[in-house]
Image (cartoon, helix red, strand yellow):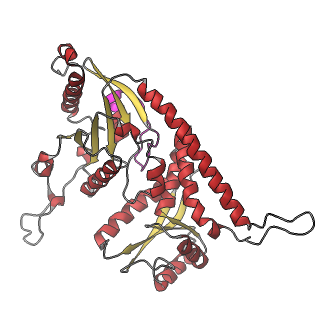
């Protein structure tokens, strides 16, 4: 697959819908996330367009009047990319391209592009390439203009296929080859996991850009790549960590996101084997994000899909240094208090006090409450370890700050 390596900021517009299933508030929230995705991929958002519709237009996704408005803006402002918040059908993409005369990308394609930029290891690159080809296969027709039959005549009689059919066959063959390659790598990784012995395995899970890699770096004193962008981490990283005299394995996994492309969920299921085989999950949450409760629900849904929802889990609410609740003036009798006005102490008294497992509030960047976190992690790992090896219980003392 052709992948971009140099990021040059392209002028883009975002297009989303307000439907019966997605109100204006949720639509704005999704477009905020889409803008961050566009920035991560190398796009500079010039304007957003939204339209209220019961269901998307089957031909052009949005109405023809709104599409004309977008077309005028694209022509007047030299826009090179139009990004749609939902996955477009091949027919919709083809029709919109004819009208707007610019590059058309949907949310799925955008995430695939970011993954292609971020993939470093052979394993990750193979997974991304497989997802790209599976996305590309039904869209080949809209990407070609030379659909005439292969040249005939003496000595030139082709197999009777159109060029598009030949290309589809090549793509299907490539998909089969990539799946075989992934199976081979999976077997190798199973052997690697088996060679790790009986150490307790702890996995960091959570929404993208919540600070998992930063937390990994602080706990394991390693240098895993971390950046304030979506999907900064794509490759699974495993490090041996020792707290006090207790060793365990810590895994940093790929972040989840809402509306995650089906192709990526399928191709990255093998990466999530690290989560399936973990003894303890640290569910990291960016509490400074206004939609962190939706993020938790998205992660829990993905964990349920891969059969890991019942694992022992600790909720780690990160970025408390960046949390700023909205304030209501004392003389304001109109504004109704919502969860956006909760202080951290008020949040701790809500459902967070009753989560399955434990909840802890930290800042990985500034190491706030970090000793409390290390103590909690030490106790959790010790409990799992001594359950597995009861005769080792006397080896591990109570955690102390000096350790």
Q: Left or right: 319 with respect to 330? A: right
Coordinates of residue 155 in the picture (x, y in percent): 92, 63
Q: What residue is at 27 percent from the left and 52 percent from the top?
A: 296
Residue 202 vs 347, above or below: the answer is above
Coordinates of residue 193 in the picture (x, y in percent): 42, 29
- Decide which of 32, 3 is in the foreground and name it: 3
Please tell me whether residue 226 belongs to the stretch shown in magenta: yes
- Decide which of 321, 389 is in the foreground and name it: 389
Q: What residue is at 62 percent from the left and 46 percent from the top?
A: 177
Total numbered labels: 0
Residue 133 vs 118, above or below: the answer is below
Residue 396 seen in the figure: no
- Decide which of 86, 39 is in the foreground and name it: 86
Say which quarter of the image contains residue 144.
Answer: bottom right
The span shown in magenta is: 218-235
Q: What residue is at 37 percent from the left and 50 percent from the top?
A: 256
Coordinates of residue 227 in the picture (x, y in percent): 42, 43
Residue 197 seen in the figure: yes
Please tell me whether residue 96 belongs to the stretch shown in magenta: no
Residue 113 vs 124, above or below: the answer is below
Q: Quadrant of the C terminus?
A: top left
Q: Left or right: 123 with respect to 388? A: right
* Dominant SS in magenta: loop
Say which quarter of the image contains residue 389.
Answer: top left
Task: Give the residue furthest to the front.
Answer: 159
Q: What residue is at 27 percent from the left and 55 percent from the top?
A: 297
Coordinates of residue 346 in the picture (x, y in percent): 10, 51
């Amino acid at each position: 697959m052709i992948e971009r390596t140099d990021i040059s900021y392209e002028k883009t517009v975002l297009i989303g819908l307000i439907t019966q299933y997605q109100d204006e508030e949720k639509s704005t929230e999704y477009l905020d996330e889409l803008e961050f995705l566009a920035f991560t991929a190398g796009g500079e958002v010039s304007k957003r367009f939204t339209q209220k519709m019961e269901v998307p237009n089957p031909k052009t996704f949005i109405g023809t009047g709104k599409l004309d408005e977008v077309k005028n803006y694209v022509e007047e402002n030299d826009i090179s990319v139009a990004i749609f918040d939902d996955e477009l059908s091949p027919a919709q993409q083809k029709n919109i391209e004819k009208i707007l005369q610019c590059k058309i990308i949907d949310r799925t394609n955008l995430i695939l592009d970011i993954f292609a930029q971020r993939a470093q290891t052979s394993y990750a690159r193979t997974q991304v390439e497989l997802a790209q080809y599976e996305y590309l296969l039904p869209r080949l027709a809209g990407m070609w203009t030379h659909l005439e039959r292969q040249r005939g005549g003496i000595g030139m009689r082709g197999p009777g296929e159109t060029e598009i059919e030949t290309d589809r066959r090549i793509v299907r063959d490539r998909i089969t080859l990539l799946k075989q390659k992934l199976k081979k790598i999976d077997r190798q990784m199973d052997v690697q996991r088996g060679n790790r012995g009986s150490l307790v395995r702890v996995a960091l899970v959570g929404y993208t850009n919540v600070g998992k890699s930063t937390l990994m770096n602080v706990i394991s004193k390693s240098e895993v790549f971390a950046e304030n962008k979506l999907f900064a981490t794509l490759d699974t990283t495993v490090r041996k960590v020792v707290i006090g005299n207790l060793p365990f394995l810590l895994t940093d996994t790929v972040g989840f996101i809402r509306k995650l492309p089906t192709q990526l969920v399928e191709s990255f299921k093998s990466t999530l084997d690290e989560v399936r085989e973990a003894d303890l999950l640290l569910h990291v949450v960016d509490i400074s994000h206004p939609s962190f409760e939706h993020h938790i629900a998205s992660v829990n849904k993905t964990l349920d899909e891969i059969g890991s929802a019942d694992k022992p889990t600790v909720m780690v609410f990160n970025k408390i240094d960046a949390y700023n609740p909205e304030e209501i003036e004392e003389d304001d009798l109109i504004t109704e208090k919502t969860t956006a006005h909760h202080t951290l102490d008020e949040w701790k008294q809500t459902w967070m006090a009753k989560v399955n497992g434990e909840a802890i509030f930290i800042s990985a960047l500034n190491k706030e409450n970090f000793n409390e976190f290390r103590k909690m992690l030490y106790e959790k790992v010790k409990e799992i370890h001594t359950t597995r090896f009861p005769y080792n219980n006397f080896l591990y003392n109570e955690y102390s700050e000096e350790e």
